[in-house]
Image: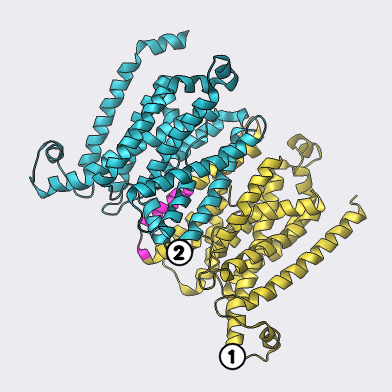
Chain colours: A cyan, B yellow
Amino acid sequence: MMKQQKQRTIPFPMKLIVGFILLVIFFTIAMAFGAADTTLKEVWLAIVAQGKISETVTMIREIRLPREIGAIFIGAALSVAGAIMQGMTRNPLADPGILGLTAGANAALAFAMALLPSLSYFGIMTSCFIGAAIGAFLVFGISMVQRGGFSPFRLVLAGTAVSVFLYAIADGIGLIFKVSKDVSMWTSGGLVGTSFDQLQIVIPTILIGIFIAILLSRQLTVLSLSEEVAVGLGQHTLLVKILLFIVIIVLVGTSVALVGNLAFIGLMVPHMVRAFVGTDYRHVIPMTAIFGACLMLLADTVGRTINAPYETPLAAIIAILGLPFFLVIVRKGGKAFS
Amino acid sequence: MIASSVIRKQRIILLILIVLILATITASLGMGASAVSFDRILPTIMGHGTFKDEFVLFSIRLPRIIITLLAGMALALSGSILQSITRNDLADPGIIGINSGAGVAISIFFLYFPIEAGSFVYTLPIVAFIGAIIATILIYIFSYSRKEGLKPVRMVLVGVGFQMALSGLMIVLISSSDNRKVDFISTWLAGNIWGTDWPFVWTLLPWLVVLIPFTLFKANRLNILNLNEPVSIGLGISVQKERVILLIVAVALAASAVSVTGGIAFIGLLSPHIAKQLVGPRNQMFIPVAILMGGLLLLVADTIGRSLLGNISLPAGIIVSLIGAPYFIYLLFKK
């Protein structure tokens, strides 16, 4: 009872608004800081004004703006994918990077670059979808064959093994076809060189994915309690699961196509968000999207400034930020992991 | 008592493994980018070879083969120890973050310390050991709880987390340095056996010469540690002390191997398992088999990697992962 009352004191729309304000603040910070110092006024001009004003303004508009917009959407996509996976598998450690999706997309990317060098951006994205789907099928397939499903511990280990395998394939292809430089440029490049052309494809895809996720969030909440409850409440669990699965693959595939490998963000954000809005996925998913975007903006800003003018890869920053979370979750999980 | 039939079986398996290793060495000597034909190998070893044959055999092939063999052995022994002390069949120096700890230390050492050509070879295993032991201590601290003692399962999970974060840290280090050094580190990471000269043999050999007998001497303790904690204490073993000593041995073995071969996962997982299936779970029985098995596996992987595709050589680490990962998944299924 106490808990319910406490939640009622701050209504969800208010929290959502606070989230949006935070997002705007982080966006402003991300736009203003970087290798080339800029003022807030120039940032404002870059977004609002038309035509050519000064070189700094053009720089912000052509380089920093698409990049930070990319950060917002990728952060949202990966975090929502993580939230869905955690709900679906009822596993607090689920994350696209840990469960083989990123590695699968990576291997597919290597294949695509080796065999079809002149692939368009859309083609690359499609191959990432296929790869992510294969990686996920391998991990979840292994876990579903086992009666009663895998324990979280087993699922993580299976994910690690599948990931190692797929990374080895990607490395091997890279070496054999002499495309390892291109592949690693792509997969560790982070948000460097994001262009508006890419965003035109990426943004609608991610928006549709998140939209479907929000539509299905009620079903996801029920599913996250237990499979039996979901069936008992008359839910078509298989259909819901398949739809959510497709959403995950689309979100992760798109993200890998744009930024490469990012583990941990999908793990961290949903856990942070649950501390604020509880476990109802109707609240968790929108909040996760906003928080994920904020975190990604922050990580990208740190990556650009910590060692300027060189870039520190985003993946590394997020991996280091993510470790404490992982440790806390493992600790709290206690008896669940045996 | 150990049944004599088991002992006989172990002897036979050991013999077969030695024969297989010798066969692989012979095959491996003749294969690779600059081939020495098979009928030239024997005369060359006897001292009747041409200069070219001698050079290829003694300065290029042989040291590499010996290093691969030794590294495989060290990793297998390390994996065997880890599996026994954590009571977890899925423990492996690569998976639980020891390799990446060594990797970070080597990256730091390589990037920020002046390197002297002469002593570099000998300091590298020590640096790797320091890095690996720090990582292991951290993993141990985070998976230890005062109430429940060391939870083996948690240790593996924490290790997986550390492995990811340390790889991240390594990327940060690499990206903040100049390109020439980066090339070396990235091939190192892929598990390429790079230390292919006699000095590397001398850095690796002492570790094994000391630690293999030591581990076999401790085999009975390992048997008991592999049961559960109350039983071990009841049998009069100071569990913490034994566990820490053996953990340090395992880390030292893995670190010395990794410092010359780069990140190779799964050898430490596979070989003890195969060995246990062949001769049963007694440590004094399966450890010798596992050691030879590890050497054989890595040697085969390296030979395949070097010769499968003609001029392009694939790092042994990749081949091992391609074979090892499916096996790991099979193990997950079986349990």
Quadrant in which residue A289 is drawn:
top left
Q: Main secondary structure of the magenta part?
A: helix
| Secondary structure type for disc 1 | helix
Residue position for label 1: B51
For the record, the magenta segment spans B165-179
Magenta stretch holds residue B168: yes
Tag 1: amino acid: Phe
Magenta stretch holds residue B184: no
Label 2 Cα crowd, 10 Å radius (few <14 / some 14-19 / many 20+)? some
Tag 2: amino acid: Phe
Can residue A285 be seen at all in this image of the molecule?
A: yes
Residue in front for this viewpoint, A75 or B253: A75
Q: Is residue A270 left or right of residue B32?
A: left
* Residue A134 horizontal/vertical position (percent): 52, 44
The residue shown at (89%, 59%) is B8
Same chain letter for marks 2 and 1 = no
* Residue A197 horizontal/vertical position (percent): 25, 46
* Residue B33 horizontal/vertical position (percent): 55, 77
Labels 2, 1: front one: 2
Q: For marks 2 and 1, give the CA distance.
A: 35 Å
The residue shown at (54%, 14%) is A233
| Secondary structure type for disc 2 | loop
- The chain identifier of the residue carrying mark 2 reads A
Can residue B87 be seen at all in this image of the molecule?
A: no
Label drawn at residue A177 = 2
Q: Is residue B332 left or right of residue A196?
A: right
- The chain identifier of the residue carrying mark 1 reads B
